[in-house]
Image (spheres, helix red, strand yellow):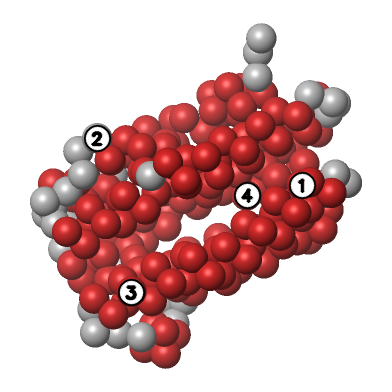
Amino acid sequence: MSRFRDELWQVVEGVYAEILAHPFLTGLTDGTLPREVFRYFVVQETHFLPDYARALAACGVKAADPAAVQRFAGDAARTVEVEHSLHVELLAAFGMDEGDARGEGAAPTTVGYGSYLLRACHLGTFPEALGAIVPCYWIYARVGEELLKQSSPDPLYAWWIETYGNEPYQETVAGVLDLLDEVAATLPEADRAKLCEHALTTARYEWLFWDAAWRRESWPV
């Protein structure tokens, strides 16, 4: 039986292939990624994650099914608690705390991605919000799963890879994809197309986020 997730993956898989081939990720697995590039990434994640948690909460507000409300409210809380703790530890590895990270400011891609997510989740329908947030879940799960096959000779990078490649995270994403299939099954074609459009945009932002770290992007003016 055909699943909507398979249709959606066809939309984003070209972007995912570019993500896997990006020197940021190949450098993670072979250990050659400059530490300063990874530090930049962690700092920008510290700025991005609160907006992602807000987007998850907004998506849950739009859901009609109480189970979906509970799922996204819970995931929003876990993003704040679990991923926040992860990034506190990663920052500490660079002798930094959250105050230091906030002092460096959010880069253009970080602001753009977070703003797009919040706009889609606050102003769009529940399926549109779902389309916007799914790539962050799904691409990280796919990246973690793929990179875990190789891991990394760098213990810090290996730890990061394990976080997203491990079974609990994969199970979380599987639950979101089950919900995606369920929601899409009753959608008119035009609404499915809008969902896919949002997903493609945020998948592209995922590539941009890693590329911005690789370039250590800054505001040009």
The CA span between labels 4 and 1 is: 13 Å
Using the rendered view, name the quadrant where residue 173 is placed.
top right
Badges 3 and 4: C-beta atoms under 8 Å apart?
Answer: no
Residue at 63% over, 40% down: 176
- How packed mark 4 is, by other alpha carbons closer than 10 Å (few <14, some 14-19, many 20 or more), is many
First in sequence: mark 3 or mark 1? Answer: 1
In x, y percent, where is residue 98? 41, 84
First in sequence: mark 4 or mark 1? Answer: 1
Left or right, 46 with respect to 80, comes to: left
Between disc 4 and disc 1, the foreground one is 1
The residue under label 3 is 89
* Mark 3 secondary-structure assignment: helix
Left or right, 20 with respect to 185, comes to: left
Position above or below: 169 against 113: above
Left or right, 164 with respect to 156, comes to: right
Nearer to us in this view, 166 or 113:
166
Nearer to us in this view, 179 or 212:
179
Q: What amino acid type is highlighted by mark number 2?
A: Lys
Between disc 3 and disc 4, the foreground one is 3
The residue under label 1 is 68
Q: What amino acid type is highlighted by mark number 3?
A: Glu
Q: Is residue 119 visible?
A: no
The CA span between labels 3 and 1 is: 30 Å
In x, y percent, where is residue 120? 72, 55
* Mark 1 secondary-structure assignment: helix
In x, y percent, where is residue 12? 52, 33
Position above or below: 44 against 5: below
The CA span between labels 2 and 4 is: 26 Å
Nearer to us in this view, 185 or 220:
185
First in sequence: mark 2 or mark 4? Answer: 4
